Image: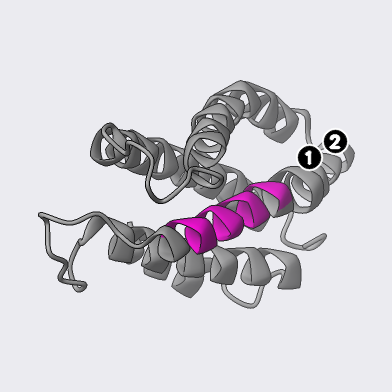
């Protein structure tokens, strides 16, 4: 996921300040996810769960990222697609329900773990974190399709 982010930043970086900022937020989210999951380049003791504070901070960044996408970036992209091309708007309409599905998974993770007492049963944490990782990977692919459309078809607007 980090490699795909780097490609997106290299390809679209500088074209739109809002997109640049959003991709930086994605980087922060991904780094925190990799740390929680103990994925390279971050090594973790697989026999122990992350700290309660790390999970809370991750959930805050996750919700901030989702909010930025839904209330800033997607609105901007869709409005530019409405003005500049029906084909682009159709793509946005097709991807929107898929993005919403990933939002639901992410918000469920947040609702489950952001307020969970550190002494509570975290029995499904690894599975839930893995499911979230897959949802984020799918979401980033959908978002990148929208960014690509904005960049290639509406770059004079961006």
* Mark 1 crowd level (few <14, some 14–19, many ≥20, 10 Å Cα): many
Outermost residue, front side: 119
Against 67, residue 125 (above or below) is above
x and y percentages locating residue 103 in the rendered image: 58, 34
The answer to whether residue 75 is magenta is no
Of the 4 image quadrants, the one containing the N terminus is: bottom left
- For the residue pair 11 and 142, the one nearer the viewer reads as 142
In the drawing, does residue 42 fall left or right of residue 145? left
Residue 8 in view (yes/no): no
Label 2 and label 1: CA atoms lie apart by 6 Å
Q: Is residue 60 magenta?
A: yes
133 or 115, which is in the foreground? 115
Residue 45, image quadrant:
bottom left
Question: Which residue is at a point 74% across and 31% down the rendered structure image?
Answer: 89
Q: Residue furthest right?
A: 83
SS majority, magenta: helix
Residue appearing at x 38%, y 68% in the figure: 31
Mark 2 burial class by Cα count in 10 Å: few <14, some 14-19, many 20+: some
Decide which of 140, 41 is in the foreground and name it. 41
Q: How is the image coloured?
A: one colour
Q: Residue at x 54, y 47 (%)?
A: 114
Mark 2, mark 1: which one is toward the viewer? 1
Residue 78 badge: 1
Q: Does dot 2 land on a helix, a strand or a loop?
A: helix
Give the residue at mark 2: 82
In the picture shown, does residue 34 fall above or below 21?
Answer: above
Whether residue 89 sits left or right of residue 66 in the image: it is right
In the image, which residues are magenta? Answer: 55-67
Q: Residue at x 12, y 56 (%)?
A: 46
Q: Secondary structure at mark 1?
A: helix
């Amino acid at each position: 996921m980090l490699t795909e982010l780097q490609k997106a930043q290299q390809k679209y970086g500088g074209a739109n300040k809002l997109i640049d900022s959003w991709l930086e937020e994605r980087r922060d989210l991904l780094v925190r996810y990799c740390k929680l999951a103990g994925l390279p380049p971050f090594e973790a003791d697989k026999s122990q769960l992350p700290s309660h504070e790390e999970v809370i901070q991750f959930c805050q960044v996750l919700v901030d990222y989702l909010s930025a996408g839904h209330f800033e970036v997607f609105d901007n992209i869709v409005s530019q697609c409405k003005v500049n091309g029906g084909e682009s708007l159709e793509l946005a309409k097709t991807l929107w329900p898929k993005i919403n599905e990933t939002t639901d998974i992410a918000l469920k993770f947040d609702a489950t773990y952001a307020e969970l007492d550190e002494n509570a049963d975290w029995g499904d944490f690894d599975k839930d974190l893995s499911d979230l990782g897959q949802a984020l990977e799918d979401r980033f692919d959908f978002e990148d399709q929208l960014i690509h459309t904005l960049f290639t078809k509406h770059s004079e607007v961006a």
